[in-house]
Image (tube, rainbow, N blue to C red):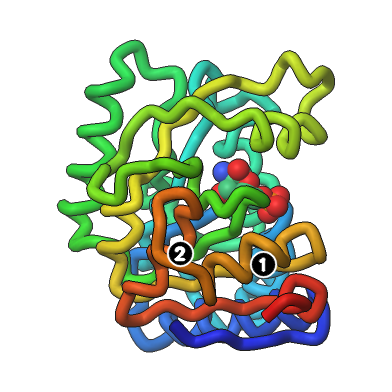
C-alpha cells in the first residue's frame, strides 16, 4: 500500500487525476471503477479540465460504478446515475454504452447483482478502481462486518452511513435504507486501487485502513492486502498517521 500525502483537498484531487489520466493515456480502452460521494468530485473536475485541454480522451474507456441506492430510478436527483451525469459524464466523452451503474430500481435485485458482476468480468475486469472512504471505514457500501469474499450484493446501510448521507436528501427519512454495491471481492479483483480521503472526519478510518489490523470491522483495511493500492490523503485526514 502506497500512501501519498497532499496538502489539501485540491492537491489530493490533482494528484489523483494524474494517476487516472495516465492509466487512460497508456491504455485508452481501460476499465475504470468509479466512486461517488463528495470526495471524488474534485478528481472528476480535474479530469474534465484535462479532457477539455485535449490531454486525455475517454472515448474508448469503460466505466463501472461501485454502487447505487435501492429504489431510486436513474433519473431521481439523488441516484448515483444523476450524480455521475452531473459531476463527470456531461463534461467528458465516455460513450453512453460503456457506462455501467447498478440498477437500484431493478425488479429482481439478486439477478441485477449477478448481471453486474458478469458484466465486469466480460469487460475483462477493472483496471483502476477509485474509492472514497466512509467514516466507519466502508468502501463502496461495504459496511463493517462485511464478508471479504462477497461479490456485488444488496447491503443494508449502517445507521452512521444513513446519517452521513442525509445531507444530500431533502429529509433524513428519504435516504434509502439499502443499496447495491460491488463486494470486497469485486473491489480487490481490480488490478489497481486508488483510495482518496480528505478531512479530519476521515482520520480515524484512514488510520485503521493503513495501520490497523486487517478486519471486516473496518472494510478498507483489506486494501493492505492488495498488491497495487495507492492511498492519497490530505493533511487533515493524515493527522493520525
Ligand atoms: C457513500 C458512498 C461511498 C463513499 C462514502 C463517503 O457511502 N457509497 O462510495 O466513499 O459515501 O462519502 P464522502 O466522500 O461524501 O465522504
Residue nearest the viewer, comparing 127 with 211: 211
Residue 24, image x and y in percent?
A: 43, 78
Q: Which residue is mark 1?
A: 197
The quarter in which the C terminus is drawn is bottom right
Taking the image as drawn, is residue 166 in sight? yes
Which residue is pictured at 48% across the width and 25% down the height?
156
Residue nearest the viewer, comparing 94 with 215: 215
| Dot 1 alpha-carbon crowd within 10 angstroms: few under 14, some 14 to 19, many 20 or more | many
Residue 57, image x and y in percent?
A: 49, 75
Position above or below: 226 against 99: below
User: For this view, does 45 lie left or right of residue 146?
Assistant: right
Residue 133, image x and y in percent?
A: 60, 57
Position above or below: 98 against 82: below
Q: Which residue is mark 2?
A: 221
Position above or below: 150 against 202: above
Which residue is pictured at 47% across the width and 49% down the height?
217
Residue nearest the viewer, comparing 90 with 153: 153
The quarter in which the N terminus is drawn is bottom left
Which residue is pictured at 50% across the width and 64% down the height?
130
Residue 143, image x and y in percent?
A: 49, 41
Mark pair 1, 2: CA separation: 14 Å
User: For this view, does 169 lie left or right of residue 90?
Assistant: right
Total tally of numbered discs in the picture: 2
Amino acid at each position: 500500500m502506497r500512501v501519498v500525502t497532499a496538502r489539501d483537498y485540491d492537491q489530493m484531487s490533482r494528484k489523483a487525476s494524474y494517476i487516472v489520466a495516465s492509466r487512460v493515456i497508456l491504455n485508452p480502452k481501460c476499465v475504470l471503477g468509479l466512486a461517488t460521494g463528495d470526495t471524488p468530485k474534485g478528481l472528476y473536475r480535474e479530469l474534465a479540465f484535462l479532457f477539455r485541454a485535449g490531454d486525455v480522451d475517454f472515448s474508448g474507456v469503460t466505466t463501472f460504478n461501485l454502487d447505487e441506492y435501492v429504489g431510486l430510478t436513474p433519473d431521481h436527483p439523488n441516484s448515483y446515475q444523476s450524480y455521475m451525469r452531473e459531476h463527470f459524464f456531461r463534461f467528458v466523452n465516455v460513450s453512453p454504452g460503456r457506462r455501467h451503474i447498478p440498477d437500484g430500481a431493478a425488479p429482481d435485485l439478486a439477478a441485477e447483482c449477478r448481471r453486474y458482476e458478469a458484466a465486469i468480468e466480460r469487460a475483462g475486469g477493472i483496471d483502476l478502481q477509485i474509492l472514497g472512504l466512509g467514516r466507519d471505514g466502508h468502501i463502496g457500501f461495504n459496511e463493517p462486518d462485511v464478508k471479504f469474499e462477497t461479490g456485488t450484493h444488496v447491503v443494508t446501510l449502517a445507521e452512521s452511513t444513513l446519517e452521513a448521507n442525509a445531507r444530500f436528501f431533502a429529509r433524513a427519512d428519504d435516504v434509502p435504507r439499502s443499496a447495491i454495491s460491488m463486494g470486497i471481492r469485486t473491489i480487490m479483483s481490480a488490478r489497481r486501487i486508488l483510495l482518496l480521503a480528505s478531512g479530519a472526519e476521515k482520520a480515524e478510518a484512514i488510520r485503521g485502513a493503513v495501520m490497523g489490523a486487517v478486519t471486516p470491522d473496518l472494510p478498507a483495511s483489506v486494501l493492505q492486502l492488495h498488491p497495487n493500492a495507492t492511498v492519497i490523503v490530505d493533511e487533515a485526514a493524515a493527522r493520525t498517521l
